[in-house]
Amino acid sequence: MVETGKIIKELRIKAGFTQKALAEALHITDKAVSKWERGLCLPDVALLPKLSLLIDVDMDVLIAKSIEQEEWVGVIDIQDCDFSQIIYDKPLVYYLLIHYLLLGIIKIHVLTDEVNRKYLNGQAFTDLGFHFSFDKPENGNMMILNHPWFLFGSDLTHQFQGAMLSERNVKFVPQNQEPVFFFSHGNGYFNDPKKFMKTAAIRTLGRGMVCLDMSDYDKSLDVASFVRIYQHNTGLHIADLQEVVLNHRSVV
């Protein structure tokens, strides 16, 4: 949060705003702006579009910096699933890991069987920059996947970011489906799962998003067909970890 606050302060001054003037433009108090700049809290996600325009910064930069400072880790809690199974042109686990890599999350706790653990210890994943551990995280901010879902859509990253910046426990739910991702502040997901499920806020997946199940052979074939048709007709690649890593590195 401190780093995000420094960015806001520097750009506010550059744009010619006092704390009071910026606060008035955003219809908030100058004390709120002061707290952002001192790293005591982050701007509400609803304010980010207007704030980014006022201080002339890409909204994605503010969001990414905010999430980076909160130090999120990934959790994949999936048993009875072959991570090495090829779905069209890549292993099933690529379709899981891409959710995290889009957000720059490379520290992932994987709770799975011995065969999958050995597979993830391969050099290919080390080269991509992933850091896997095979125990439960003790505490902190966690993005949790407990079923082999694959989500796809043009606005997916922003929807994830909105859940992460909400400062509350969130269940990420596609329309007319069960929750597919969980965002936990602290260790409530593991300490008291029933309470977590009951109290976590529901965030509905936006329109135009695709949620695909890879939990058995027939469903995996459906995913493979979707990937084949999409890639053939668009010339774009789905769940291409190497491409996302290269894009992140070029930005850095």
Image (spheres, grey):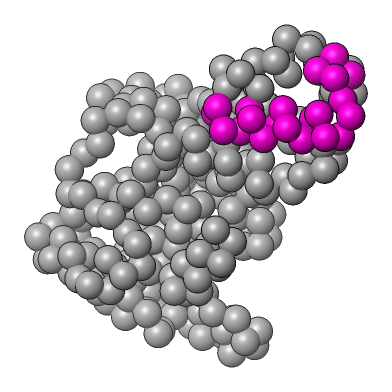
Q: Magenta segment, principal secondary structure?
A: helix
Q: Residue at x 25, y 36 (%)?
A: 137
Residue at (51%, 52%) from the top-left corner? 103
Residue situated furthest bottom in the rendering? 232
Say if the magenta span includes residue 3. yes
Please tell me whether residue 7 is drawn above or below residue 222 in the rendered image. above
Q: Is residue 187 left or right of residue 240?
A: left
Quadrant housing the N terminus: top right
Residue 22 relative to residue 237: left or right: right
Query: Residue at the left extreme?
Result: 114
Q: In this rendering, would 211 be left or right of 197?
A: right
Question: Is residue 115 in view?
Answer: yes
> Residue drawn at (57%, 22%), measured in percent from left and top?
39
Which range of residues does the magenta coloring cover?
A: 1-21
Q: Nearer the viewer, residue 196 or 24?
A: 24
Residue 64 lies, in percent from the top left, at 58, 45
Q: Which residue is located at x 89 percent, y 19 percent?
A: 21
* Residue 124: % across, % down: 28, 74
Residue 4 inside the magenta-drawn segment? yes
Please tell me how many numbered marks the rendered image carries.
0
How far across and down, in percent of the image, does residue 224 sit? 44, 80
Residue 199 location, x and y as percent? 45, 22
Height in image: 202 above or below 241?
A: above
